[in-house]
Image (cartoon, rainbow, N blue to C red):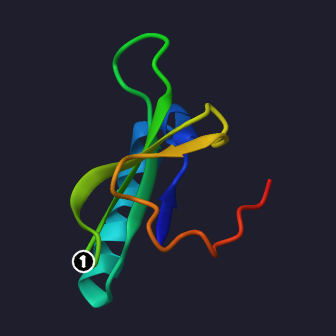
Amino acid sequence: MVWQSVTRQYWPAGEADRVQALVEAAARQRPVVHVSMKFPDVDGSPAELYVAGPDAGPERRLAVVGDHGSPITLDHGWGSGLSDVPIRR
């Protein structure tokens, strides 16, 4: 699993490109799930959590999240079977 931090928006372009190249290289060798936290282009909108990968399919929104990851509001259709997964606060 690759977790893309929201801090990526502050990285120098070259560093972001190198990280992306590493993720793509890893994906050619084994299944990789990419989880990313993004902010929509609308001021004041909450951050969104996206997931993509071989078992997750093409990128799609998983949840709306707070600026620092919590609280998490799962989108409809996500979350079934997650009732036994502990959430650390």
Say which residue label 1 marks.
54
22 shown above or below 31: above
| Res 59 quadrant in image | bottom left
The residue furthest right is 89
Kind of residue at badge 1: Pro
Other residues around mark 1 within 10 Å, as few (<14) / some (14–19) / many (≥20): few
Q: What element carries label 1?
A: loop
Please tell me which residue lies in front, 64 or 31.
64
Residue 34 position within the rendered picture, expressed as x and y whole percent measured from the top left: 39, 64
The image shows residue 55 at horizontal and vertical percentages of 28, 78
- Above/below status of 83 relative to 9: below
Q: Is residue 59 left or right of residue 2?
A: left
Q: Which of 71 and 16 is in front in this view?
A: 71
Q: Position of residue 12 (x, y in %)?
A: 48, 37
Identify the residue at horizontal 39%, vertical 46% (top origin): 75
Nearer to the camera, 77 or 58: 77
Q: How many labels does the image show?
A: 1
Residue at image x 29%, y 89%? Answer: 29
Q: Where is residue 9 in the image (x, y as percent from the top left)?
A: 48, 34
Q: Residue furthest bottom?
A: 29
- Residue at point 33% right, 57% down? 77
Seen at 36% across and 14% down, the residue is 42
Q: Which residue occupies the extreme left position in the image?
A: 58
